[in-house]
Image (cartoon, grey):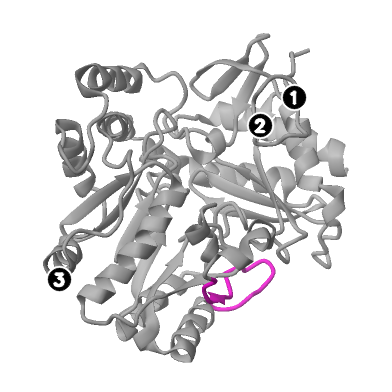
Amino acid sequence: MSTLYAHPEGHVFYRKMDYARPKISHGEGIYLYDEDGKRYIDGSGGPLVVNVGHGRSEIVEAITRQAQSAAYVHATMFTSEAIETYSNALAEIVPLEQPRFFYLSSGSEVVEGALKLARQIQMARGEPNRSIIICRSLSYHGMSLGALSVSGRPALRNPYLSMMQNMPHIRHPYPYRFPASGRELADRLEESILAYGPENVAGFIAEPISGASLGAVVPPDDYWPRVREICDQYGVLLIADEVLVGMGRTGTWWALNHWNVKPDILITSKGTAAGYFPLGFIAASNEDVDLVFRKLGDFNHGGTFSHHAVGAAAGLATLRILQCEKLVENAAELGPYVNKKLHHTFAHHPQIGDIRGRGLFWGLEIVQDRATKTPFPLKAKTAWHIAERAFELGLIIYYSQGCADGASGDVIMLGPPLTINKAQIDEIITILDQTITEIVG
């Protein structure tokens, strides 16, 4: 039995105050171990952060070398070899014309920065009235006020509605509950642009494959090409939030690659430095960045820890592991295997309404009645109970509530390190099968 630590003991302001947790000892590969020696399979990668696995000495050594050389310099005063080399390496995989990279420390920060950049690009283009960012309902883009303004999860937004500038939300792709063509769904964007006036709309932000709110929902194939077409028609900047699905998670470097669509601004964070250092970046074309510089001066944004040399060293080491070990290719190859195993195990389960995902990011929607797609009541906390029992059995999974209507609707997600193999996938699904059987039958 593992020793547990809980509020109000000690002085930690815990993220979840009603949850007693074990203390981590160490990690190795796809496994974590607590101080009492219990092993956990990291079936959600952090959640969806530790894409190269735990205990990677290469990243630790890169961090150490840079920290010993120069741990911190302010981004307005110096650049560093780590930042320059990492940016050159990223330019080879980011689908933008001569990309430029602005580094920050989290997904919320890069979302916030991308919203500001979209606004300033439009100002530099001579369109100062463009300040609206259209977004999607039941999306998730972070916890800062700016990020919440373009997110769609009511439980996260409601306490702060009076403090934020709310942005327009359109229907999200969700084939399981809202069957519609991708073009029909994308045309909601055009309707919103016309309703608010194209001269007032700066950008459209969305996750290429839905993340935490909906749980690995893949849109119809005609969705993203039509979105790109609409954005081009009305001069609206397409912001791809690849914070969760980027850096190889779905079997391509970027989830938008699945549809051969290029964004105007790309943001990512979770897998950038694999959790070894808090790091994310905003990517934009040299043309747009240079236009902002020429017309407005510097990008009106910043942060004490932006362009961090230690973070860049961690990011570069992570990128090299992904490339050298062909982990993006591994995610692509294992995706169909995970799909097959999940369907073999759960396709006829009376409480599994939908199985969805791509690469090494998958979601299972749990329902009370499969025929009617009726979700379990919110108060039942079904996804939470599944995640808790899996944890007790030594499997870490990610869960979310609210996918059906913003309040009810349970989804559990798998997103293990991209180093995983078929035998380990089998082990995860075996434990998950036992867990779901125990909790919902």
Q: Residue type at mark 2? A: Tyr
What segment carries the magenta color?
166-181
Q: Residue type at mark 3? A: Lys
Q: Residue type at mark 1? A: Ala
Query: Measured along the vertical axis of the image, is residue 44 above or below residue 26?
Result: below
Residue found at x 86% / y 60%:
369
Residue found at x 28% / y 35%:
308
List the single residue furthest toward the left. 294
SS of the residue at dot 2?
loop
Side of 93 relative to 138 (left or right): left
Is residue 252 inside the magenta stretch? no
Q: Which residue is mark 3?
A: 295
Query: Measured along the vertical axis of the image, is residue 379 above or below residue 61?
Result: below
Is residue 169 inside the magenta stretch? yes
Side of 330 relative to 306 (left or right): right
Q: How many marks?
A: 3
SS of the residue at dot 1?
loop
Residue found at x 67% / y 59%:
159
| Image quarter in which the N terminus is found | top right
Q: Which residue is mark 2?
A: 14
What mark, if any, has residue 308 been given in the picture? none
Q: Is residue 257 visible?
A: no
Residues under labels 2 and 1: Cα distance? 8 Å
Q: Which residue is mark 1?
A: 6
Say whether disc 1 or disc 3 marks the residue closer to the N-terminus: 1
Query: Measured along the vertical axis of the image, is residue 60 above or below residue 256?
Result: above
